[in-house]
Amino acid sequence: MELRINRRALVGIGLAAAVAASSLAVLRTDSGIASSHREAPAISADPQHDNTDVYAFVSPDKADTVTLLANWIPFEEPQGGPNFYPFANKSRHNIKIDNDGDAKPDITYEWVFRDEDKRGNDTYLYNKAPVTSLNDPDLLYRQRYTLKRITPDGSKTLISDGIVAPSNVGPASMPNYGTLRAQSIRNLPDGGKTFAGQADEAFFLDLRVFDCLYGCDLSEVGQDTTKGYNVNSIALQVPASDLAIKGDAKANPVIGVWSTTDKFNGDKYVQVSRLGNPLINEVVAPAGLKDAFNALPPEKDADVDALVKRVTDPELARLLQSQYGIKAPATPRNDLVEIFLTGIAKANGPIKADLNSQSLNKDAVKLRPSEMLRLNMSIPPTKDPNRLGVLGGDLQGFPNGRRLSDDVVDIELQAVAGAAQSGKLVPGLTDKVDRNDRPFLQTFPYIPLPSNVAVNQR
């Protein structure tokens, strides 16, 4: 099938290929995971601190703002009582921004959670009667949080008493969960909004990719493995000027985004989870370096030769060649180095287009190669988003940032099959899961309300 797209969209195919070429290599390193769900040995045993996905996009209904969203705790079965799914207390849940290209955080938004537990020795119940508001006395367990904005110049507390939207216990306990979600959204003092609480698992895919690449013959497709599960989300919507160098989003439109979890171990904080682009730890880092990658700051990425080699010679391309006869592109993949470590700019490597490298910012410093999700905030929201993102000619989509509706798996499958170089799609190469089972919301925080129906209906 011939692709009829312009040159900029073809560059997008190359971008998606970069992500894809690393992503499905997980077949020989881990099993039974989605995007950064249980991606490393240590974090798989500590789900509260497991950062599962990061999204960054220009807000579709407020184009002068950017929405940042990060999820924790994979595969939350909705009826997992009596304790359900609180955020980890005391630990720092961070969304970090590098806007000048030195791979160090110029801005950190930090959420720290604390319990408000009234159950004591009197009851095991999460709530003793239907809950109609976040301050309802019948809600016996709730969490509060403090949100700070941290820069090299200091720290500012944005929210000191935020209330987390509780886990969705069920229709009898929480007859109007949407009201609780709405009450949990807080306005920030200098403009913008924030949210913390349970949400639908918005990453849609068929995880039978791990069974010999969909059964070795594409017979195992069409089943949304994450359907019905929930996650814990934090979300932030701020003016683009808040994220840009010198507050100038026109001169400095590109940001790099990643999220981390810093676990409090009794006397200090230790970074135990890190996420930028989806599927990076699973497939770029070999098994022996996965825990180390979760603890690594982006500024150190380019120094780890074993990780860089996984980018320049991706395993997935060889797997597709051996199992499906799809010829692997020639190595070294310098285009992937540009995608993962520098962003896309004409001066950075073989992809001769300017898209999402911080080096495009007027006031950027010398670029330091590093892995992060990069977003060009100057590209406006698409009226009718294409689920294939830049692969489908929609430059506002993945991998220029990541929207909730971007079909990451199909983008990656087609790209790693050679679309970046051939301009052709492989017919039928899809997991046949094209959208989330629940519609995305039209306003902040956009991610759907959490399910309260058991996943196992048999």
Image (cartoon, helix red, strand yellow):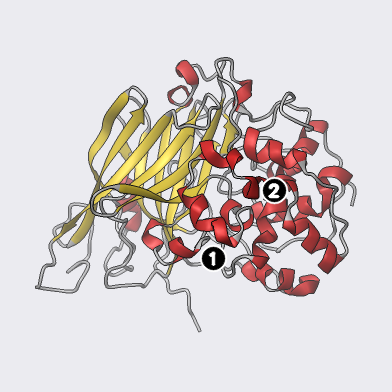
Query: Up-down: is 20 above or below 239?
Result: below
Reading the chain from its start, which is encountered first: label 2 or label 1? 1
Label 2: few (<14), some (14–19) or many (≥20) C-alpha neighbours in 10 Å: some
Residue 331 at what x, y percent from top left?
A: 82, 47
- Residue named by callout 2: 309
Mark 2 residue type = Lys
Q: How many marks?
A: 2
Mark number, residue 226: 1
Residue 89 at what x, y percent from top left?
A: 26, 54
- Residue 319 falls left or right of residue 181: right
**Quarter-of-image position of residue 426:** bottom right
Query: Up-down: is 387 above or below 170?
Result: above
Mark number, residue 82: none
Q: What residue is rendered at 66% in x and 67% in y?
A: 28
Q: What residue is rendered at 74% in x and 43% in y?
A: 391
Q: What residue is rendered at 37% in x and 25% in y?
A: 152
Q: What residue is rendered at 61% in x and 58% in y?
A: 286
The residue lying toward the viewer, choosing from 126 and 305, is: 305
Residue 57 at what x, y percent from top left?
A: 54, 37
**Quarter-of-image position of residue 43:** bottom left
- Residue 292 falls left or right of residue 356: left
